[in-house]
Image (cartoon, rainbow, N blue to C red):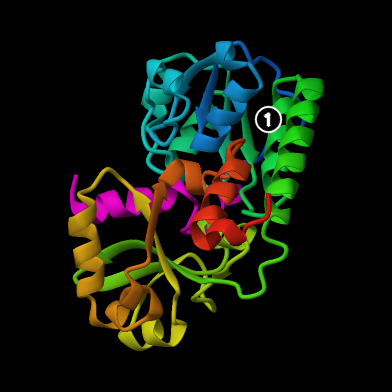
């Protein structure tokens, strides 16, 4: 897999390309008729099904479903935006629950012709989006009571996590960097998972005015004046990654660059918008503000 393909896949994992599934598949409303053999598409969907205790229904998952570790025992049907209809059908599913934006269109059309019902789950990256996803998945699986309990718990935990930064007067400006391509910084703008988690953690996205991800000019980086650079921890050599970031003259000239303020967190944990989001918000806000975060 080439570097550019890997980066495109990483972007897709967290919904940063702002694609919509509704252009090519009609969402099934309510409960699925048969949930004895479910394929989950999207890391947060798989996490929710496990958190509901309904993992016994799962017979497959996509490549982005990396938590919990028990999910790795399930057959991998491929990357969520590059599904193979033949691969999905080979495990004889009775239903598919997929995060919004899964595809491609041709694969979904083939699965529809094979009469495999879908539920598409919206991805909005807001304080209420996780509980909404939980309720939709719970309804699809006909476990509404369990879903309500989990959604209520997640909502309360997230509200408490957000409250911990309510007394922060000066909000940090955070630049989320997905990658550096040819020396260009690929950063998160509006309507992205990174933008959503930064705001939930009581900080401001240092760049705005565009949707999803965009390669920034040096001037845009300087004008953004980030206090902190946020990146995904992919198991890279941290020293090498930091060196590459700080070698960018524009980054080096910002407050974040001057202070070498770089935070890295696991990608699915940070940007998945699943049941662990409140914990991710706490961890990020603590790393941003330290003891200034109220407990």
Q: Secondary structure at mark 1?
A: helix
In the picture, measured across the screen, residue 113 lies left or right of residue 222, that is right
Q: Crowdedness of circle 1 by 10 Å Cα count: few (<14), some, many (20+)?
A: many
In the picture, measured across the screen, residue 197 lies left or right of residue 188, that is right
83 up-or-down from 101: above or below: above
Q: Residue at x 60, y 72 (%)?
A: 171
Q: Give x and y (percent) for residue 88.
A: 43, 24
In the picture, measured across the screen, residue 166 lies left or right of residue 267, that is right
103 up-or-down from 221: above or below: above
Q: Give x and y (percent) for residue 69.
A: 42, 22
237 up-or-down from 43: above or below: below
Q: Residue at x 58, y 41 (%)?
A: 279
Mark yes or no: residue 69 visible: yes
Find the residue positioned furthest to the front.
Answer: 291
Q: Is residue 20 magenta?
A: yes
In the picture, measured across the screen, residue 78 lies left or right of residue 5, that is right
Quadrant in the rendering for residue 139:
top right
55 up-or-down from 168: above or below: above
Mark yes or no: residue 37 visible: no
Location of the N terminus by quadrant is top left
Residue marked by disc 1: 137
Q: Give x and y (percent) for residue 3.
A: 20, 53
Q: Which residues are magenta?
A: 1-25
Q: Residue at x 71, y 18 (%)?
A: 33
The one of 4 and 257 positioned closer to us in this rendering = 257
């Amino acid at each position: 897999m080439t570097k550019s393909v890997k980066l495109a896949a990483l972007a897709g994992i967290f919904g940063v390309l702002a694609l919509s599934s509704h252009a090519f598949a009609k969402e099934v409303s309510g409960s699925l008729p048969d949930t004895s053999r479910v394929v989950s598409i999207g890391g947060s969907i798989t996490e929710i099904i496990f958190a509901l205790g309904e993992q016994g229904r799962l017979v497959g998952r996509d490549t982005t479903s990396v938590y919990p570790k028990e999910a790795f025992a399930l057959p991998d049907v491929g990357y969520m935006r590059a599904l193979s209809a033949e691969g999905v059908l080979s495990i004889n599913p009775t239903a598919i629950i997929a995060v919004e934006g899964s595809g491609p269109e041709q694969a979904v059309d083939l699965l529809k012709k094979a009469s495999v019902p879908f539920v598409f789950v919206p991805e909005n990256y807001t304080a209420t989006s996780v509980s909404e996803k939980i309720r939709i998945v719970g309804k699809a699986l006909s476990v509404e009571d369990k879903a309500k309990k989990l959604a209520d718990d997640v909502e309360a935990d997230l509200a408490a996590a957000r409250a911990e930064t309510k007394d922060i007067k000066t909000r940090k400006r955070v630049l989320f960097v997905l990658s550096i391509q040819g020396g260009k910084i690929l950063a998160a703008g509006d309507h992205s998972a990174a933008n959503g988690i930064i705001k939930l953690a009581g900080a401001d996205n240092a760049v705005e005015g565009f949707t999803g991800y965009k390669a920034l000019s040096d001037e845009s980086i300087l004008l953004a004046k980030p206090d902190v650079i946020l990146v995904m921890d992919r198991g890279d050599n941290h020293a090498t990654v930091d060196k590459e970031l700080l070698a960018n003259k524009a980054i080096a000239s910002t407050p974040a660059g001057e202070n070498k303020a770089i935070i890295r967190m696991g990608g699915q944990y940070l940007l998945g918008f699943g049941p662990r989001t409140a914990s991710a918000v706490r961890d990020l806000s603590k790393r941003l503000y330290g003891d200034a975060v109220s407990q």
